[in-house]
Image: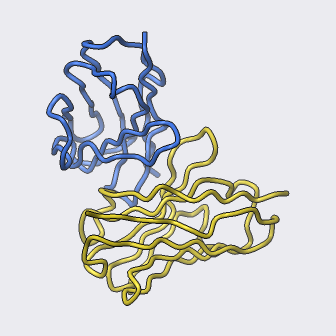
Amino acid sequence: DIQMTQSPSTLSASVGDRVTITCRASQSIRSWLAWYQQKPGKAPKLLIYDASTLGSGVPSRFSGSGSGTEFTLTISSLQPDDFATYYCQQYNSYALFGQGTKVEIK
Amino acid sequence: EVHLLESGGGLVQAGGSLRVSCAASGFTFSSYAMNWVRQAPGKGLEWISVISGSGANTYYADSVKGRFTISRDNSKNTLYLQMNSLRAEDTAVYYCAKDLGVTTKIFDYWGQGTLVTVSS
């Protein structure tokens, strides 16, 4: 079975910081990876799919890269609305999420 | 505008059954696969099931296979999840999620979720 591992689990950052979250798959998932943002008490929101395609209405400060087993989500300049938990998800084989990365205020 | 509204959650005893529903609007429901994703309190996301647009094809995570059944009524634009033999570990918020396409398993719209609590 494919395993998805995100790092770090928690990230402390300030408004304006460049933030990078990593997601690693235990085997190649080609580019079949999505990223979601979730705020407390709310449903997740699709940010990126196919590793680097921006979802509808998602600000351009979000970007995704990678293929195979290593992927990154980058927020170029962290905004107050971006403090949330981020999940990667592979869909090469069914669907499996990473454990999440919480981005908190430094 | 796409809108998904879950209902039917609540408190049920271990071993019991519950059916949750998801009413969809704002898109051609029968053209898209639909999914259920759950989140245990304070935990991460777990995909549990997908159904094709026609309803002919269904898939389940191993954790619910044989106990849960996904179905849809395209005439009513409604998705269902029948949950039997419930366990304490099934306690979670259950989200319905629209698939980006046929069965991509990319979830582009989500409902607000419905909480299912299984008491032991």
Question: Which color has been applied to chain B in this rendered view?
Answer: yellow
Instruction: Examine the rendered structure and indicate whether residue B21 appears above or below residue A41.
Output: below
Q: Position of residue A36 (x, y in %)?
A: 35, 42
Which residue sits at x=18%, y=35%? A59
Find residue B25 and report its image quarter: bottom left
Find residue B82 and report its image quarter: bottom right
Instruction: Examine the rendered structure and indicate whether residue B32 appears above or below residue B96.
Output: below
- Total label count? 0
Find residue B35 and report its image quarter: bottom left
Q: Position of residue B48 (x, y in %)?
A: 51, 62
Q: Nearer the viewer, residue A98 or B72?
A: B72
* Quadrant placement of the N terminus of chain B: bottom left
Question: Which color has been applied to chain A in this rendered view?
Answer: blue
Q: Position of residue B66 (x, y in %)?
A: 63, 75
Q: Position of residue A24 (x, y in %)?
A: 36, 34
Which residue sits at x=14%, y=33%? A60
Say left or right for B18 vs B2: right
Which residue sits at x=74%, y=72%? B85
Which residue sits at x=52%, y=57%? B113
Say left or right for B18 vs A59: right
Q: Nearer the viewer, residue B81 or B114?
A: B114
